[in-house]
Image (cartoon, rainbow, N blue to C red):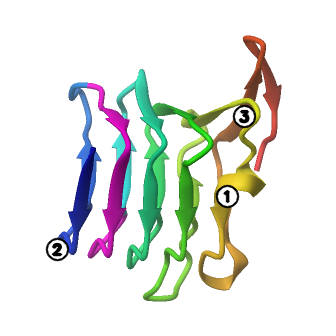
Amino acid sequence: NLTLRESQSCGIYAGMNGASIHLDNVSVENSGYDGVEVDGTERNTMKNCNVSHSKWSGLVVGSGGSITIDGNATTVHHNGVCGGWVYGMYTYHSSSSILLVSPLTKEMISTNNDGGRNYGGQGTIQTITNNIIKDEKK
């Protein structure tokens, strides 16, 4: 139950060899770089969170990192406001992943990001249905 606004860099950053983050009903708005970045840490979660109007990507996962997203109120929208090659949800390394708990889909939660780049990258974006992972790669 927290709102973070106008961070000069990333709104929330979970860095290499750091602790996992667990966000519940958190809003990250108008970040100077990425809204939420998970880099090399696993077991991160977001539930019913809003990430919007970041200058760069809304949610970035890289270097073997992973995050699980749950909650019908979760949204990643209107990010990439500076233009350039950014996404709503971005997996920038082949070993990074974003897991969406059913009924969530990448099309449902990541919308209206700059240039229609709502999701992408080298890693995977997957939906978990009844503890079974359905691959929705890029």
Query: Any magenta on residue 31?
Result: yes
Camera-nearest residue between 27 and 7 = 27
From the viewer's perspective, is residue 33 above or below residue 91?
below
Q: Residues within 10 Å of mark 1 (few under 14, many from 20)?
A: some
Mark 3, residue position: 126
Residue located at (73% from left, 11% from top): 131
Which amino acid type corresponds to the residue marked 1 in the rendered image? Gly
Magenta-colored span: 20-34
Residue located at (72% from left, 50% from top): 106
Q: Which mark is residue 8?
A: 2
Residue located at (45% from left, 57% from top): 50
In the rendered structure, the answer to whether residue 91 lies left or right of residue 63 reads right
Residues tagged 1 and 3 counted as in contact (Cβ below 8 A): no
Name the secondary structure under disc 1: strand
Mark 1, residue position: 120
Mark 2 → mark 1, Cα distance in angstroms: 24 Å
Question: Which badge, 2 or 3, is on the more N-terminal residue?
Answer: 2
Q: Position of residue 113 (x, y in %)?
A: 60, 75
